[in-house]
Image (spheres, coloured by chain):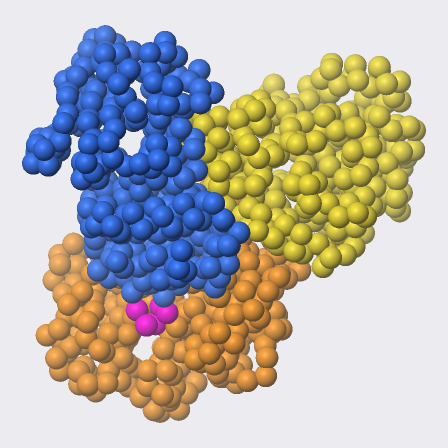
Chain colours: A yellow, B orange, C blue
Amino acid sequence: MRNLIDIRDMTVEEIDRMLDLADRIFEHPEQYRDTANHKTLATLFFEPSTRTRLSFEAAMLELGGRILGFSSAASSSATKGESVADTVAVVSGYCDIIAMRHPKEGAPVVAARHATVPVINAGDGGHNHPTQTLTDLMTIRREKGRLCDMNIGLCGDLQFGRTVHSLIAAMSRSPGIRFSLISPDELCIPDYVREILTERGCDFVEIGSMEEVMPTLDVLYMTRVQKERFFNEADYIRLKDSYILDPAKLSRAKDDLCVMHPLPRVNEISTLVDNDPRACYFKQARYGKYVRMALILTLLELVKEG
Amino acid sequence: MRNLIDIRDMTVEEIDRMLDLADRIFEHPEQYRDTANHKTLATLFFEPSTRTRLSFEAAMLELGGRILGFSSAASSSATKGESVADTVAVVSGYCDIIAMRHPKEGAPVVAARHATVPVINAGDGGHNHPTQTLTDLMTIRREKGRLCDMNIGLCGDLQFGRTVHSLIAAMSRSPGIRFSLISPDELCIPDYVREILTERGCDFVEIGSMEEVMPTLDVLYMTRVQKERFFNEADYIRLKDSYILDPAKLSRAKDDLCVMHPLPRVNEISTLVDNDPRACYFKQARYGKYVRMALILTLLELVKEG
Amino acid sequence: MRNLIDIRDMTVEEIDRMLDLADRIFEHPEQYRDTANHKTLATLFFEPSTRTRLSFEAAMLELGGRILGFSSAASSSATKGESVADTVAVVSGYCDIIAMRHPKEGAPVVAARHATVPVINAGDGGHNHPTQTLTDLMTIRREKGRLCDMNIGLCGDLQFGRTVHSLIAAMSRSPGIRFSLISPDELCIPDYVREILTERGCDFVEIGSMEEVMPTLDVLYMTRVQKERFFNEADYIRLKDSYILDPAKLSRAKDDLCVMHPLPRVNEISTLVDNDPRACYFKQARYGKYVRMALILTLLELVKEG
């Protein structure tokens, strides 16, 4: 593994090994704080994303490495018409590893082809965001103690939410997973995801509200429902409350439910839920740093025996 | 003390201790250059401010620490509708201390409530900017050798200038301070500041030009008079020269006057004054770094015995 | 040498010494990786330039130093009307050396006058970009083994291209250089460059296409021809292909031709040329880091005996 462009490029075993390493770093960060000394991470963010960028930068700094880069296309040579391929070819000379976010699907593949250092896809226009998926998997494994045999609810925009598709694709490889896909009809999972589930013989239901399945869930993954996705305002107003998690809805859930969200959140989880011990989304953001530390060490081939 | 949101949260003794530490760092920076090793400062600047941001970053770097963050809201998740509370909850997982600047008054209070690391208010929309006040106090104490028994002139926009209000509030606690408040009528100090002065029995005059009091001053704190603050253009043109410090006006001042300015300056101090030994504003900017080093060490509880 | 504002401020001997140092760092980077420990570079970029900024930042980090700064005027106090002189006077207190890019010609000279630390001109509106010239010279010397006795073609916009003028000025001091100046009439070298060439008795030809001279060239320096520079669209369309380097044109060149470009490139070198061993422009970008490392060490007076 030299680059990470798409989570599907990783085998189940590679993912397990990555999460094992992330766990070890999480538990003994001081043992890893000089592992990337004298190495530099370039964060090339052609569109802004605080959370992801800062998470990568914190990861590299806490490994003893250094960071440079840009946080929006406006600060880059892209404004002068330079191609991603050229930017990456040049920046390869200034760093040891690249994390790139780009509004165009496929840009990280082009980048990986022209870079002379490992490239991590930190999100490309609507399709892949593999470090988010690794973060989600680490969160589930740490919070539930396993990646199999559980009921997972995914709620909100299941059509356009790239993190949801990747998570379904990754988890559907595990045995004993049952998915509850909670969304308005307009925003149900696309056919290609339904095909993955069917092919792999996964148990899943598609439903319009979360109340019914709530008592059965082990994990509830919330996503944002954007107003613009609806065909008309009336539908939006009628439906939106169904996809907002609040203490009332949560009252019927299991005591050990794990509530997740890729963040940023707007209003799809009431802030009244934040102090509930089942709210795991801020922990999830924190785990993201450790997963990225594990990934950087792995791609730089700096991993110590665990 | 876990956060610094408002200078009024600090007792006189806490301020003295902070300035003592800043002085020690200023005099022996090499003794402090590894005190924040393996610690990370996040600078979350929701509005741009070179001076303040770079000052914080330099402070952290010179303590051996690391920095990450963003320099404008456009590069942050705020563009996606994320609340300050959520941003700070997430970023808490990526750093050990946060310095935040925000155009909305009160945002740092919200931040402090949701952060799991110390938060420093690096300026919020028009009200508080406590590290500027600490910088001002360090400057006066170093340049005059004391924080009491002196005549302080404050000149320019005394109505909207937040740094002026904080400085008056802080200095009015010291004995023997006499304030000369020099401004156009439209921009005189607000009632709440006048009340502080009256309550504490402070000696002060409000006047329209600096010439008269110049020979009596020990400190002259200049601020910018913005054209937009005036009711009409005619008033602005008639009055503006009264609030510009130039060598002619300075010729009647004491030899050991300390001329200060929070910067950035536009034209309210003639550049002809820059080489006068009484011009302390660039020194003042420099002291700001040491005060911030002292503050970071204090909030991180890394202070060595002095 | 305390600042680097204009490549003409450096003697031939100073340039040689700088390139010698850059070569040593290139060959033994590990010997230099802690030479700038505890030193800080401020990158003050009043206009964006990924390549140059990241190159400076990588240079400082790989010397063990630290970086801070801003990447566009929008993130700086310039938006509040602060002068370059004041910005630099303040930032001098936060760093040990400054690299500044500014859209206004002459801004770095002003900066150098008001800074209390060394200032490097990282490009000013259309006139000087001395670290690009040092990069070009290092590239030629490393790739050709010498800086004299060769045929250099310069192709494209020779009128407005600042890097071209500086390179001609620098190389025309060496013996045995013959220049082929390839451009449309509208974009030929300005009179002042022609005068330099004439005064120094340099051999040069001005021609409209590269085919004829291609077989004679040792170095071919390509630059971008911007559509806006042409008087009319018809001329542009008729001429533009003449100034695009492609494999067909390259087929008649020497086997050891060194093709250079200051980058970013738009389409003036076909990407089909990228894998040709004669394509040196990505190497050139890489050398730029080492030249900047040498420059930083020299200006900070940290150079070890070679």
In the rendered image, the vertical position of residue C14 relative to residue B249, given as above or below:
above
Q: Residue at x 54, y 65 (%)?
A: B64
| Nearer-the-camera pick, A4 or B164 | A4
Tell me the chief SS of the magenta region: helix
Quadrant where the image shows the N terminus of chain C: bottom left
- In which image quadrant can residue C297 be found? bottom left
Judge whether residue A30 can be spotted in this image.
yes
Residue A289 vertical placement versus B225 (above, below) = above
- Residue A53 lies left or right of residue C117; in this view the side is right
Q: Looking at the rendering, in which quadrant would you find the C terminus of chain C?
A: bottom left
Is A67 located above or below residue A100 in the figure?
below
A222, above or below C94, in the image: above
What x and y, as percent, mark residue C199? Answer: 7, 36
Between A303 and C200, the residue placed more toward the observer is C200
Residue beneath the point at 43% across and 80% down: B27
Q: Residue B284 lies in magenta, yes or no?
A: yes
Classify residue B218 by image quadrant.
Answer: bottom left
In depth, the one of B123 and C181 nearer the eye is C181
Residue A60 horizontal side relative to residue C274, left or right: right
Please state the horizontal and vertical placement of residue A306, each as a whole percent of the image.
81, 48
Q: Which span of residues is magenta-colored?
A: B282-286
